[in-house]
Amino acid sequence: MTTRAGMLIAAGALVAGTVAVPPASAAGAGDPAPRPLPPLAWTDCGTKAYPKLQCATLPVPLNHDDPAGRSIRLALTRVPHTAKTFQGPLLVNPGGPGGSGRGMAGYVAASLPAKVAAQYDVIGFDPRGVGKSEPALDCRPGHFDPVRPDSVPRGTEAERTALERAQAFAAACGKKHADLLPYVDTVSAARDLDLIRRAVDAERINYLGYSYGTYLGAVYARLYPERVRRMALDSVVNPHGVWYEDNIAQDYAFDTRHKDFMAWVAKHDGAYRLGADPAAVEAAWYRMREELRDSPAGGKVGPGELEDTFLPGGYYDGYWPTLATAFSAYVNEGDPAPLTAAYERYGEADSAADNGYSVYTAVQCRDAPWPRDWNVWRKDTWDVHAKAPFSTWNNAWYNAPCAFWPVEPLTPPDVSNDQLPPVLVLQATDDAATPYEGGLALHRMLHGSSLVVEEGGGNHGVTLAGNDCLDDHLAAYLATGTVPRAEGGAEADAVCAALPAPEPEPKAAKEKTGEKKAAARVLPAGTTLHGLLGHVR
């Protein structure tokens, strides 16, 4: 769920010098008296793709329990409504935590049916600490510079080295952002949403959230149920597992999705020449991983970077052809260039990724308790790795700073809710990043919600990505508030077929893999969305 390819999953350990911070108060009716908000000064910031885009900034309290205290600033974007019928603001969030949402406004406004989009002010925003919001977090620039040690520790010394790296990140974050970290969490971000509502002078908001954005939306709805008009939640975080258990569930799910990719490569053996047996293809992938330990591709793609490169394929199968081409070139031709190019496209961290990861850790480590004993993490990770080796240790180290986080964790709110208008929940059955059980769980927790399922779909983020059936349900809901209702006691209120799997790239496109000219070929409909969701840049 942020800008770097390997942006999620789980781990935890022991904390030194923790700072005690009282939990955020329950928001809503008991909030301190709000200070007046200055009017938003929208200015044109249109792009070639989205010429009607406008930008503004909004000051909000760093600490919502001290509204007269220090302010920070949120960066907002908007595509204003043009229809006579105005249905209010539609706030959109791409997830993360740590994902920049400013680009979402233009995309959502352009991707919805024109008659529907015209009735809303579509508003994107960078949450606190993210992107153009000020101040932005950047705990330890270059933390993911290649080549990192192999993510799977081979012995005590290797594990100690990786653990020290995680400790160094947490310590750097505490030293550099001690004043901010107690207030970078989901409840604070949800209270920011309500200030955006006030700033645009709306009694209620409409909301479309993807991935972590579903959890942010559910928390907002719990705090301010009377201020929700319509809410669509796509690819749903399981509220019961925030965050350690959710990340373990991802380990299993990403391994399954990686096996789906291996089976797809085997099906297209004529194109990739890696074998027609999925098990043989997977064995070739792990042999490639082993070779990269001693000889990183292009001097920058070792085992951890390889996992970072292929993890986006677990989010979105539109990346499979490029990944398979790089895999094939390395194994069959001994050519590391396409693999290096794929890493630079899908897995390499830049300054935006450094910021996204800093916010990711700040939110997840603050939101909920993590194990404080590294022995718990070690046992859990080895147990899961034995069954699901693709990215389990990579994910453990990604989250390991939470074992040493310099701020006490909060208690996650119960997001059960029986005070909302119908909420539209959309979920693919084979989603790896937010497994299907999370969509079911939240559907059951939100009384009166409607669950739309993409049967057999494995992508993460399923609306406005080319599936007309899902998009029709979303458009109808935003246009009229209509949701489908199941008959005969079925849990899913509507079922849509998944999009077909991609086809291998044409030979000419393969030959250009890694070259900028390759971008000129026609890309799948969901590619732009998945770029905005942070799965690739």
Image (cartoon, rainbow, N blue to C red):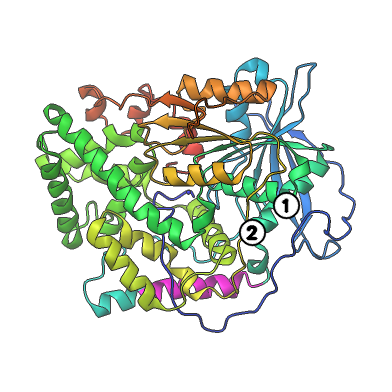
Residue at x 52% of width, y 62% of height: 361
Q: Is residue 345 above or below residue 362?
A: above
Magenta-colored span: 163-178
User: What secondary structure characterizes most of the magenta part?
Assistant: helix
Residue type for callout 2 = Pro
Residue at x 53% of width, y 27% of height: 486
| Helix, strand or loop status at disc 2 | loop
Query: Disc 1 designates what residue?
Result: 223
Q: Position of residue 231 (x, y in %)?
A: 65, 36
Is residue 211 left or right of 391 when viewed as pictured? right
Residue at x 36% of width, y 36% of height: 458
Q: Position of residue 183 (x, y in %)?
A: 68, 64
Q: Can residue 146 be seen here?
A: no
Please tell me which of labels 2 and 1 falls first in the chain.
1
Foreground pick, 473 / 269:
473
The answer to which quarter of the image holds residue 367 is bottom right
Q: Is residue 427 above or below residue 21?
A: above
Q: Position of residue 535 (x, y in %)?
A: 43, 43
Q: Quadrant of the C terminus?
A: top left
Q: Is label 2 in contact with label 1 (beta carbons under 8 Å)? A: yes
Q: Is residue 468 above or below residue 374?
A: above
Few, some or many C-alpha atoms within 10 Å of disc 2 (few <14, some 14-19, many ≥20)? some
Few, some or many C-alpha atoms within 10 Å of disc 1 (few <14, some 14-19, many ≥20)? many
Query: Disc 2 designates what residue?
Result: 413
Distance from disc 2 to disc 1, alpha carbons, whole Å, reads 9 Å
